[in-house]
């Protein structure tokens, strides 16, 4: 709880999104204070108190704010400014006068969560006019009626009686129930996904993409929008068929039957486009009218089945309810090329695909989380009942074949030469049955429901209502889905269709595109051809919706909390599998095309990697898999054969040392762990913490295609931060075992304690059983100056200028600039050609010195390089020692075939080189040979890097060796691509840090190729055993 001021109230006013503390002279009446951010994010005195205070919730007035919707929303509530939650720093840090605390919680997280929309306002802004509230629909009008109208499409009136004649009542019920099972399971999955968070516009695409991610969501969104556009054509052609049939019955025609359907279809879809462009309110009113017309047509049909059949209807095969007609029509009677179970299923299934019509306008619903589940499931239930009843009634009243001629009556109902059930009712349709010329009966006459009904024009009106409402629903759904897809910018060249117009943000351009696609398919003018085309696309959509629900459930993500509980992840999985199986059973080549399109679009999005983060179940699954494998790895004992150099790379900000990043990435990519470490020197303030943990570093690594983790820490000094990284980095077995750092180029031009810390880091790594690698390049590695940024000078300073006086308290980075800057190119990104990698294996460190060159040669850029191994030896035993080393390397199976023995490695170095080495040590020597012990200790107090004469003499042999080795490197490896040599070890307390740095400097100076100093942890990393 914040402490109340003793003399005056504290008024913190938000100016330019920053809190400013007024001077202490502010003399206002002392009273309790609270945080009120309803309008201006201001602390007010008690005289301004209102219901915003936290006292009713906590019992005290504090800076803490009570729970509020605005704290979790991404958009502001219409008509008022958005409230902001105080940040953690504001709650627990001391606010100094004239200090500017960090921003509010939401402001600090804008970059992470994609910004805050609509909730930003300032006192400088004038009052804006209130936005017009767009039309919003409830679950009945917005979802249930819309879904029922879309399901009751052209198939119901024009093809269901014909499917009943083909498959029989029994198998038709199976087809209906199988379709309803698939759509029902999909409806349950859709309901679960739709209630797992706030649903916006975009319908099916929005649900799948936010659940499975942009890869599958984008591909299925494009396919689903296209399928709806084709469905507009299917329903419009059904309407045109009906109109053309009426014209034909009345003896009128425009051109010919096919072209009449095309002309009527184009005119109709143009009329529907006009309704859509008028806005959602007009479209919704039209849907209600269509629904009432269909209800009246249903009542008219069922009444017609019980009205005694007239001779005119009997001639067309209608005899009211008859048990023998029901029995005869219960079994299948396949006819024509489509005469099969799956042939009928492919034609019927599109009539069940309207279940997503409500979800597709999710952005226009008052409460999608309630409307989508309730409306969708009710629509599936009632439409399934209606299909079953119509199938059973039409199959019980109408025979399969009838001539329509009233002259084909029988004098006696028992004539022996009469064929068909109509013989029992005094009608002889034998001639047309034998000649297959019957034009009526449910096998031949698509308008059988109209013929059965009490008043046929009402059935015609129902057909008009069903076809036009379904076409209108699809005409609205396709652009709405496509608009959301366009706004996400997953695919090129489609963004122009994402622009919205009017208060409802209508996708006018999407309407026009859907209109053009629909006309193209209307020109086919054959309903049975169009229907199977879209069946696979809808099935593909259903499969992915069900898989989305299953996948989100199986990942056990805490973010999967749907308020709709009546679903089963296993039922969703079954629904997904059945949908895919049916795709292939219907039309295998169309299924392959649909899946091929999905995979192509999936591959494109995977390649482009759009910068979106929707918290998909794929991300949750990746975490689950990584966690499971990491825990399983703990149960596996380590073995030398499985050793991998897992590198902690001290890069600072990775963009500052691209050469070091590229080099380590070369031999760790797709093989072992790489982790870039960054230490921000300073106190753990929000600025320093943000700098250390900025996501821009990972973005930079990803942009450079480096497979690496990043870890940043804030510490009081560099060595303390590295100690944190050495001890805390990694997870289980996935933890670093090799420390890689850049060489400190200008250590002798900086303050000595930097060198002391640098060598101390090496000692800390050895103490923790790390292997150590130090990379030195002639031109240095730090490119921070070219990026115009600041870097911790304790890492290295390659610019040659005077040393910085002190490390900065924090590192200030511009994340956008780091990512936007052109990627610097390093020599490790180029092919090395036929050069050599010279390995100086002078001391046995367990084999790490040999392992790293071997891993490099497995990469394409280094594959043509020849590895030469140099070892020390005696001139009398050169050949023998060469054979011994060669035999050992062969047992390691490294593929190195060039071994050279250096017999003169023990020679004294040249005097001028020794003088150069001694001059380098001059500034750091105590020169205490002629001084007593107490005086020498006083001289060294506070300067542990000082070198006493005794220490210099004790390490003289090693010093000579480093100078001599540099001479050998100059002779043998001047033109190598890379020099790898065993790094000397300086004993703690015996070898001062400046002397050790002089060794490394002398050893690697004046060399053109990069030099990698390697020292393993003295444990085997190579073995020639198979177990």
Image (cartoon, helix red, strand yellow):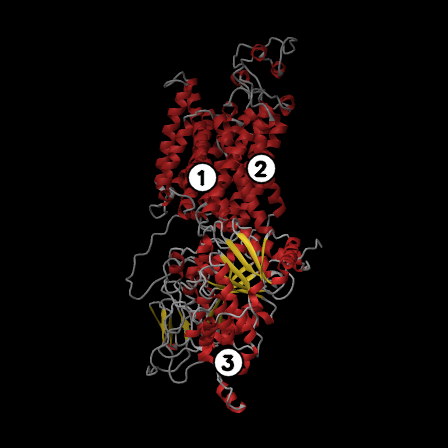
Q: Nearer the viewer, residue 888 or 698?
A: 888
Q: Is residue 479 visible?
A: yes
The 10 Å Cα crowd at callout 1, few under 14, some 14 to 19, many 20 or more, is many
Residue tagged 1: 225
Lower position in the chain sequence, tag 3 or tag 2: 2
Residue tagged 3: 947
Q: Nearer the viewer, residue 474 or 880?
A: 880
Q: Which of the two marks, 3 or 2, is nearer to us in this view? A: 3
Q: For the C terminus, which image quadrant?
A: bottom right
Residue tagged 2: 580
The 10 Å Cα crowd at callout 2, few under 14, some 14 to 19, many 20 or more, is many
Lower position in the chain sequence, tag 3 or tag 1: 1
Q: Nearer the viewer, residue 293 or 255?
A: 255
Across and down, in percent, residue 489 comes to 41, 47
Across and down, in percent, residue 328 comes to 64, 21
In the displayed structure, does residue 773 sit left or right of residue 807? right
425 lies above or below 183: above
Instruction: Quadrant for residue 165, please give it.
Output: top right
Q: CA distance from mark 2 to mark 1?
A: 19 Å
680 lies above or below 9: above
Across and down, in percent, residue 191 comes to 54, 47
Kindly give the residue lying farthest to the right in the view shown.
1027
842 lies above or below 382: below
Q: Secondary structure at mark 1?
A: helix
Q: Which of the two marks, 2 or 1, is nearer to us in this view? A: 2
Q: Secondary structure at mark 2?
A: helix
> Are the residues at dot 3 and dot 2 in contact (C-beta closer than 8 Å)?
no
Q: Secondary structure at mark 3?
A: loop
Across and down, in percent, residue 231 comes to 46, 33
In the displayed structure, does residue 255 sit left or right of residue 436? left
């Amino acid at each position: 709880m914040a402490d109340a001021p003793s003399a005056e109230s504290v008024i913190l006013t938000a100016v330019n999104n920053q809190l400013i503390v007024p001077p202490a002279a502010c003399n206002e009446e002392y009273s309790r204070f609270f945080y009120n951010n309803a309008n201006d994010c201001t602390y007010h005195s008690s005289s301004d108190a209102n219901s915003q205070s936290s006292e009713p919730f906590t019992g005290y007035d504090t800076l803490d704010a009570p729970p509020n919707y605005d704290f979790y929303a991404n958009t502001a509530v219409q008509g008022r400014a958005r409230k902001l939650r105080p940040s953690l720093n504001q709650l627990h840090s001391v606010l100094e006068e004239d200090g500017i605390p960090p921003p509010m919680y939401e402001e600090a997280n804008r970059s992470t969560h994609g910004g805050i929309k609509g909730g930003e306002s300032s006192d400088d802004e004038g009052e804006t006019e209130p936005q017009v509230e767009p039309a919003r629909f409830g679950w009945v009008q917005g979802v249930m009626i819309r879904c029922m109208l879309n399901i009751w499409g052209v198939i119901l009136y024009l093809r269901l009686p014909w499917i009943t004649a083909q498959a029989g009542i029994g198998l038709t019920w199976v087809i209906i129930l199988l379709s309803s099972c698939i759509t029902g399971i999909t409806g349950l999955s859709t309901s679960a996904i739709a209630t797992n968070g706030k649903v916006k516009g975009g319908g099916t695409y929005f649900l799948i993409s936010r659940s499975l991610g942009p890869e599958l969501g984008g591909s299925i969104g494009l396919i689903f929008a296209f399928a709806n556009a084709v469905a507009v054509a299917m329903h419009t052609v059904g309407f045109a068929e009906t109109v053309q049939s009426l014209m034909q019955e009345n003896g009128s025609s425009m051109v010919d039957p096919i072209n009449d359907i095309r002309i009527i279809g184009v005119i109709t879809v143009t009329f529907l486009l006009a309704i859509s462009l008028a806005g959602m309110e007009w479209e919704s009113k039209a849907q209600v009218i269509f629904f009432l017309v269909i209800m009246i047509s249903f009542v008219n049909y069922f009444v017609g089945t019980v009205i005694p059949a007239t001779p005119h209807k009997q001639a067309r095969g209608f005899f009211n309810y008859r048990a023998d007609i029901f029995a005869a029509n219960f079994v299948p009677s396949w006819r024509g090329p489509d005469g099969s179970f799956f042939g009928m299923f492919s034609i019927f299934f599109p009539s069940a695909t309207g279940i997503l019509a409500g979800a597709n306008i999710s952005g226009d619903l008052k409460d999608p989380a309630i409307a989508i589940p309730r409306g969708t499931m009710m629509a599936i239930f009632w439409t399934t009942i209606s299909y079953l009843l119509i199938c059973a009634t039409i199959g019980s009243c109408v025979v399969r074949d009838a001539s329509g001629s009233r002259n084909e009556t029988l004098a006696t109902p028992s004539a022996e030469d009469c064929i068909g059930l109509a013989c029992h009712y005094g009608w002889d349709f034998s001639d047309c049955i034998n000649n297959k010329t019957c034009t009526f009966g449910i096998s031949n006459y698509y308008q059988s429901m109209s013929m059965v009904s009490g008043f046929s024009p009402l059935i015609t009106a129902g057909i008009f209502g069903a076809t036009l409402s379904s076409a209108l629903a699809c005409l609205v759904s396709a652009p709405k889905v496509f608009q959301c897809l366009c706004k996400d910018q997953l695919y090129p060249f489609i963004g122009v269709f994402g622009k919205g117009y009017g208060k409802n943000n209508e996708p006018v351009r999407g309407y026009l595109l859907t209109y053009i696609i629909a006309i193209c398919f209307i020109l086919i003018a054959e309903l049975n051809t169009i229907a199977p085309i879209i069946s696979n696309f809808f099935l593909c959509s259903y499969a992915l919706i069900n898989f989305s629900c299953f996948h989100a459930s199986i990942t056990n993500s805490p973010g999967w909390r749907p308020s709709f509980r009546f679903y089963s992840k296993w039922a969703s999985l079954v629904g997904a599998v059945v949908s895919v199986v049916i795709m292939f059973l219907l039309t295998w080549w169309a299924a392959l095309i649909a899946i091929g399109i999905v995979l192509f679009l999936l591959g494109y999005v995977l390649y482009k990697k759009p910068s979106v983060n929707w918290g998909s179940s794929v991300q949750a699954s990746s975490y689950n898999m990584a966690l499971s494998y990491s825990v399983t790895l703990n149960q596996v004992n380590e073995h030398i054969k499985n050793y991998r150099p897992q590198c902690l790379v001290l890069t600072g900000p990775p963009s500052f040392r691209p050469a070091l990043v590229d080099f380590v990435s070369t031999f760790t990519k797709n093989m072992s762990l790489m982790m870039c470490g960054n230490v921000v020197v300073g106190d753990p303030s929000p600025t320093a913490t943000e700098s250390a943990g900025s996501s821009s570093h990972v973005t930079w690594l990803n942009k450079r295609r480096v497979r690496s983790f990043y870890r940043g820490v804030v510490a009081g000094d560099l060595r303390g931060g590295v100690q944190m990284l050495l001890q805390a980095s990694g997870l289980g077995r996935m933890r670093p075992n090799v420390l890689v750092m850049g060489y400190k180029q200008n250590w002798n031009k900086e303050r000595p304690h930097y060198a002391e810390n640098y060598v101390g880091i090496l000692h800390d790594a050895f103490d923790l059983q790390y292997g150590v690698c130090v990379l030195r390049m002639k031109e240095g590695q730090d490119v921070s100056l070219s990026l115009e940024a600041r870097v911790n000078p304790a890492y290295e300073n390659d610019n040659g200028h005077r040393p910085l006086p002190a490390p900065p308290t924090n590192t200030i980075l511009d994340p956008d600039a780091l990512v936007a800057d052109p990627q610097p190119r390093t020599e490790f990104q180029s092919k090395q050609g036929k050069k050599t990698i010279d390995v100086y294996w002078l001391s046995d460190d367990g084999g790490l010195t040999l392992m790293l060159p071997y891993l490099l040669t497995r990469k394409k850029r280094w594959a043509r390089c020849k590895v030469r191994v140099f070892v020390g030896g005696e001139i009398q035993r050169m050949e023998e020692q060469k054979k011994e080393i060669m035999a050992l390397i062969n047992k390691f199976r490294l593929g190195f075939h060039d071994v050279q023995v250096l017999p003169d490695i023990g020679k004294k170095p040249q005097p001028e080189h020794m003088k150069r080495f001694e001059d380098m040590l001059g500034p750091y020597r105590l020169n205490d040979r002629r001084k007593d012990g107490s005086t020498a200790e006083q001289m060294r107090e506070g300067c542990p890097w000082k070198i006493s004469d005794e220490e210099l003499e004790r390490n003289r042999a090693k010093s000579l060796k480093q100078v001599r080795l540099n001479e050998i490197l100059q002779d043998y490896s001047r033109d190598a691509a890379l020099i790898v040599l065993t790094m000397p070890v300086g004993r703690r307390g015996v070898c001062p840090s400046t002397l050790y740095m002089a060794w490394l400097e002398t050893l690697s100076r004046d060399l053109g190729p990069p030099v990698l100093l390697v020292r393993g942890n003295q444990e085997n990393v190579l073995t020639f055993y198979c177990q």
